[in-house]
Amino acid sequence: MSPYALETRHLMLPGGVAKVPDLQLEPGDCLLVIADEPGRARRLSRCLAGLEPPESGHIELAATGAPLPATWLEPGIEPLASLSVRENLLLPAWHHGLPAAHVEERLALLYPDDRLLADDRLLPERLDAMEQRRLVLARALLLGPVLLSLHHPLAGLPARQRLALADWLRGCARQLGTVLLMSLEEPLLGAHIPAPLLLIDTHDSALFEHWQALLDSPLPAAQDIRQELSRLCSPLREKKTRP
């Protein structure tokens, strides 16, 4: 039996561009995706979740008996306004008949501080943007999917909240044994999230174990990231050298 929760072989994205390196991800692994064009990252996240067929290649998810082997989310998916926070969170679990013991165990992991769940009448509109985003993500994690494939899950949040949400996501996915794939709307976020990175370029792509390795890559998309980093740092250099 394979130790991997997600494996791909000879994967080519729709449109015949961006051949993806073979992936072998174990339960609880996290992979960050950065693309030179957001649509390519979105296609990859949807292909891995089974929502779009690849141009060619194979995708295999481990059989775990989860109600939904893979879940895909992107910005714009919101909680149901008429249901309480707790009802929003539990609705998919109820629909799929998840055993009560599993639900309570996962709730304790996802919300160790159960303040938001204690009030059965608390509506999502009373939550801030980060807590609403967290609610949607927790609702998906509660089902224990093999893969949680997220397109730009940190978009629109302040910098500190983005990193806090990323840390929470990685910790929960690791404990649940869910493979977490996150495409980043801002490539420089990859410098602050300790996880391997997949860089997708127009005609090629590559895997990197850490941020510095990506910066050293000869791929054009990596060159663009280096230029952006240099541009952001140049005012700081000028300030330091100013008499």
Image (cartoon, rainbow, N blue to C red):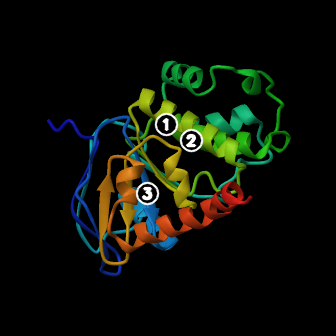
Q: Could you tell me residue 147's position as x and y percent?
A: 40, 45
Q: Residues within 10 Å of mark 3 (few under 14, many from 20)?
A: many
Q: Nearer the viewer, residue 105 or 9?
A: 9
Q: Residue furthest left?
A: 1
* Residue 43 falls in image quadrant: bottom left
Residue type at tag 2 = Ala
Q: Earlier in the sequence, mark 1 or mark 3?
A: 3
User: Which residue was labeled with disc 2?
Assistant: 166
Relative to 80, 98 lies left or right: left
Identified at 35% across, 76% down, the residue is 14
Q: Nearer the viewer, residue 230 or 222?
A: 230
Relative to 112, 226 lies left or right: left
Measured along the vertical axis of the image, is residue 204 above or below residue 184? Answer: below
Residue type at tag 3 = Val
Quarter of the figure with the N terminus: top left
Q: Could you tell me residue 193's position as x and y percent?
A: 50, 43
User: Which residue was labeled with disc 3?
Assistant: 33
Q: Could you say which disc has been placed on residue 170 in the image? A: 1
Q: Residues within 10 Å of mark 2 (few under 14, many from 20)?
A: some
Q: Is residue 145 visible?
A: yes
